[in-house]
Amino acid sequence: MATTAPRCRHRYSADMAGGRLLVVAVLAALCAGGGAQATARVELVVAVTGVEVRFPSAAVSWQVSAPATVRIEYGLGEDYGVWSRPTRARQAGQGRTLVAGLEPLATYRFRVTARAGRQQAQATGSFTTGPTLPWTTATTTRNALFLDWQPFFPRMVWRQCPWAYPQSLAAGVNLFMGTGCGDEQAQLDALAGRAYSVLDATRPIDGRGVVGYHLLDEADIRVPGPDSLPRLPPSKESRRVTFLTLSGHFFSWAAPPEQGRGIYPGLIDRAEMVGFDLYPLQSWCRKDALPAVYDAQRELVRLAAGKPTFQWIEAGQMEFCQGLEPSPAIVRAETWLAIAGGARGVGWFPSYWKPEVAAEIGRLSREIASLAPALLGPEVPVVVDGESPVKAGARSYNGATYVIAANASFSHVAARIRVPNLRPGRVRVFGEGRTVPVVKGTVTDSFRGLAARVYIAPPAGA
């Protein structure tokens, strides 16, 4: 049976001045023309009609020509990184999908995909976020720091002087912990909404970009007990998060602190986000100790149960271990080892870097920012078979699964990574333009020395 062709919408486009919306999505519907007859089947078309940025999230508006399920992939590059939740359009017309966990002053690219049965249609676009809000609401969940009710993956430096801010901002640093070479207000003024700050709990001020306060650095080797630290109001009341950095002495491979390891539960109780520094090259003088970056992170996740954790990564020469300065490849491997181990934030120390290390930190920042909401998702069980030096962790987010794997050795190795709930098919290797098969929940791949990868299994039906 034939029917009259539906009225056509030939073109959808959207553009805004001022850089807030950089979208042009133009798709033509397939229509019968000039009195010709067409079947009742409507060709699926999707187009972007606008983007409303409400930092730290954005709502993408779209239009479909038929009932469909719509998802949005988004990130800082062509590989996107994460998916939105699906939006169901029960009839032809307009709809909106929220994209969450955005960063300040960043340009995101996105792809809208509509599916209806075997039909699929896509449209792409981009948008740029603004600076931090005049006042930021900060709190935590068991998995993440939340800023203005959106998950946020901090990439940090410690007590940096203002002359180094441009290098750090260019490398993607989004949180400055502590204050160096000046006072706290001068730091907030200099950052001017381009990044967030965590200030000293002994000199608490508030202002644009402040999200919390840090306790005494490495308090486990500097105070007699937890009562020596202040107990700040919880973020559910103050909307300011308390941060604590421990030394590596909590780790079972390291010697315990003078007070014994019994000090740690009380110290952790004083904070809402807990991290540590280890530095296998610059403190232990051991290139073969890189697996400790992952293993210590796993131990802290268990010790700080229910609180998000972070780790400081060695990124330059310190006062010990001459000749073992971390290379860009080591900085990269340690960063992904920490994240695979469960870190919900990372920092790089010292807070100034050689150009080649700064470039690598910039690359890491871009990758982490693209994947941030997923890296902050719930953990998924994962096992690396055998005695491989490859360490792995996994997360789930909006129906997708992310497997983070890093080679903690300098040798070329193979690894079999088992994630029981991975569906048969293929996973995409983020940033590499290739896919790898999944056989019985297992991904098999080879890794050069210090290589790190993120494998992405899309949501069902995506």
Image (tube, helix red, strand yellow):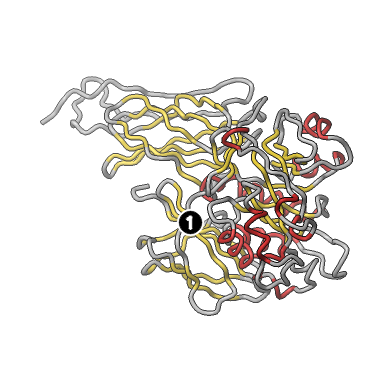
Foreground pick, 307 / 439: 307
Vertical arrangement, residue 324 with respect to residue 266, above or below: below
**Which residue occupies 75% across, 55% down?**
219
Q: Quadrant of the N terminus?
A: top left
**Which residue occupies 45% across, 63% down?**
381
Q: Is the residue marked by circle 1 packed among few (<14), some (14-19), or many (20+) residues within 10 Å?
A: some
What x and y, as percent, mark residue 157? 76, 47
Residue furthest out toward the left? 1
Left or right of residue 37: residue 109: right
Label 1's element? loop
What x and y, as percent, mark residue 350? 81, 54
Left or right of residue 242: residue 87: left
Residue at mark 1: 379
Vertical arrangement, residue 175 with respect to residue 274, above or below: above
Foreground pick, 331 / 251: 251
Vertical arrangement, residue 416 with respect to residue 191, above or below: below
**Which residue occupies 71% across, 30% down?**
193
What x and y, as percent, mark residue 291? 64, 70
Foreground pick, 435 / 11: 435
Q: Quadrant location of residue 176? A: top right
What x and y, as percent, mark residue 194? 71, 33
Total labels drawn: 1
Vertical arrangement, residue 29 with respect to residue 154, above or below: above
Residue furthest out toward the front? 227
Left or right of residue 295: residue 255: right
Residue type at tag 1: Glu
